Image (cartoon, rainbow, N blue to C red):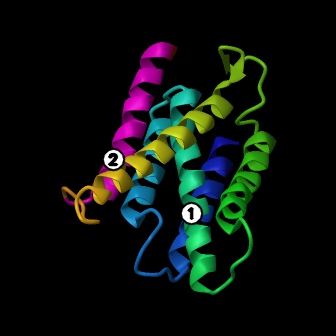
Amino acid sequence: MQKKFIILNLSLFSLIFFFKTSIVYAVCPVCTVAIGAGLEISRALGIDDVVTSIWIGAMIFSMGLWLYEFLQKKQIKFKYSKLISIAFMYLLTLPFLYFFKIFGLAFNTLWGIDKVLLGIILGTIFFIIGVIIDKLLRTYHEDKAYFPFQKAIIPVSLLGLTSLIMFFITN
């Protein structure tokens, strides 16, 4: 089952690279690749599901932003298109996680919440915070980054810190 899950996620993730995106990305490709790599490394190392799913949540959100940018480039615009694009990615992913018994297991909870669902929520929240911090820093620096790869480093650093905290909580 885990092998099917990994293959499915890698397949969905690789579809991103077939889309021709615009010059300005909502979230840069380096950040999305880092999220995918973090997800696979943590699963391979047997790290707790809450930690792994932090990266799943960030990856789903990132893919939703990519879908939104793709639609914008193709001049497909509609009301709440960003919100709908992001929600669509969650609706594509969560049923597969449930179907492959990745979440929804009675014994796999933390604080009464499913570990995978908790991690996805935390990953989404801290990824959004990272994107907001990057945008705020750029507003104070004439829309330029303070350091190379700032757009990727800030969200990934927050995800790493959140993962580390949750790792210590679960061990």
75 up-or-down from 38: above or below:
below
The spot of residue 110 in percent (x, y) is 64, 17
78 up-or-down from 117: above or below:
below
* Image quadrant where residue 140 sits: bottom left
Answer yes or no: is residue 171 visible.
no
Q: Specify whether residue 86 is painted magenta.
A: no
State the predominant SS element of the stretch in magenta.
helix
Q: Residue at image x 64%, y 42%? A: 2
Pick whichever, 148 or 9, lies toward us: 148
Q: Specify whether residue 159 is painted magenta.
A: yes
46 up-or-down from 93: above or below:
above
Q: What's the distance in space between the residues labelled 2 and 1, CA to CA?
A: 17 Å
Q: Residue at image x 44%, y 70%? A: 25
The spot of residue 21 in percent (x, y) is 49, 80
**Which residue corresponds to mark 1?**
65
Q: Report the side of 128 relative to 79 (left or right).
A: left
Crowding at dot 1, Cα within 10 Å, few <14 / some 14-19 / many 20+, comes out as many
Judged from this view, the residue extending furthest toward the left is 147
**Which residue corresponds to mark 2?**
154
Q: How many marks?
A: 2
Q: Report the side of 12 relative to 100 (left or right).
A: left
Q: Which residues are magenta?
A: 148-169
